Amino acid sequence: MKSKLLILLFLVIFLSFTILLFMTNIHFKKRTFCGNGICEIHENSVNCCMDCGCYKDNEICIENKCVVKEIELSDDEFVRIVEEYFKAKGETIEEVGEIYNISLKTILGKTAIIKTNKDVYGVTIAENRTLFLYECCMPGSRLIEVWIKP
């Protein structure tokens, strides 16, 4: 009889702990959802950039979508920097081609074809105001100079 009581007591205690643990897990279980600040195993930059961020350097997460960052370099500022560069080189700008925004893995900025009194160049200015001067205008054009605006 004593052994039956011990077995019954053991079962009651075991069931009590099991129920208690089960109820605690249900009530306090950490909920997984996009926006909880944790990049969980089922989340990535496509379905939850709020938690995981964006994989590309030139993207930011807005309303849970990775979008290309706005370039913080106006066309007017682009032209001013180009003019400053060529003035220091003793060249004058005769024509500025259409200015395009560029968004590459390593460069976010603007680019255009520039005609001076001496030659025609491809010019790219990164968002950090670094100017890249290229031979114009063949595929695979050679980088001539990198100039960091003082």
Image (cartoon, rainbow, N blue to C red):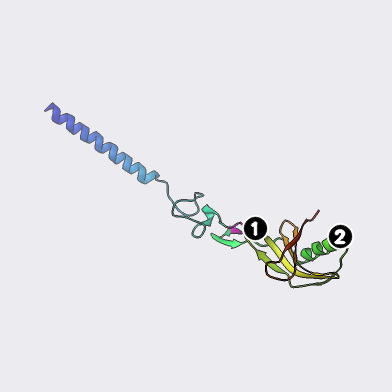
Camera-nearest residue between 76 and 27: 76
Camera-nearest residue between 89 and 60: 89
Q: Which residues are magenta?
A: 56-60
State yes or no: residue 74 in magenta: no
Please give the name of the residue rendered at 48% of the width and 55% of the height, measured from the top-left corner.
Answer: 34
Q: Which mark is residue 88?
A: 2
- Looking at the image, is mark 2 or mark 1 earlier in the sequence? 2
For mark 2, give the secondary structure: helix
Residue 108 location in percent, x, y? 67, 60
Q: Which mark is residue 8?
A: none
Residue 120 location in percent, x, y? 79, 70
State yes or no: residue 58 in magenta: yes
Please give the name of the residue rendered at 18% of the width and 33% of the height, measured from the top-left corner.
Answer: 8
For mark 1, give the secondary structure: loop
Residue 28 location in percent, x, y? 40, 44
Kind of residue at badge 2: Ala
Residue at the right extreme, as displayed: 90
For label 1, count other residues whose C-alpha is less than 10 Å away and answer few (under 14), some (14-19) or many (20+).
few
Tell me the chief SS of the magenta region: loop
Could you say which quadrant of the image residue 1 lies in?
Answer: top left
| 82 relative to 15, above or below | below
Camera-nearest residue between 22 and 132: 132
Q: Disc 2 to disc 1, how far (Cα)?
A: 27 Å
Please give the name of the residue rendered at 25% of the width and 34% of the height, measured from the top-left corner.
Answer: 13
Q: Which mark is residue 106?
A: 1
* Horizontal relation, residue 12 to residue 92: left or right: left
| 72 relative to 24, above or below | below
Camera-nearest residue between 13 and 44: 44
Residue 117 location in percent, x, y? 86, 70
Kind of residue at badge 1: Thr
Please give the name of the residue rendered at 88% of the width and 63% of the height, measured from the top-left corner.
Answer: 90
* Horizontal relation, residue 10 to residue 92: left or right: left
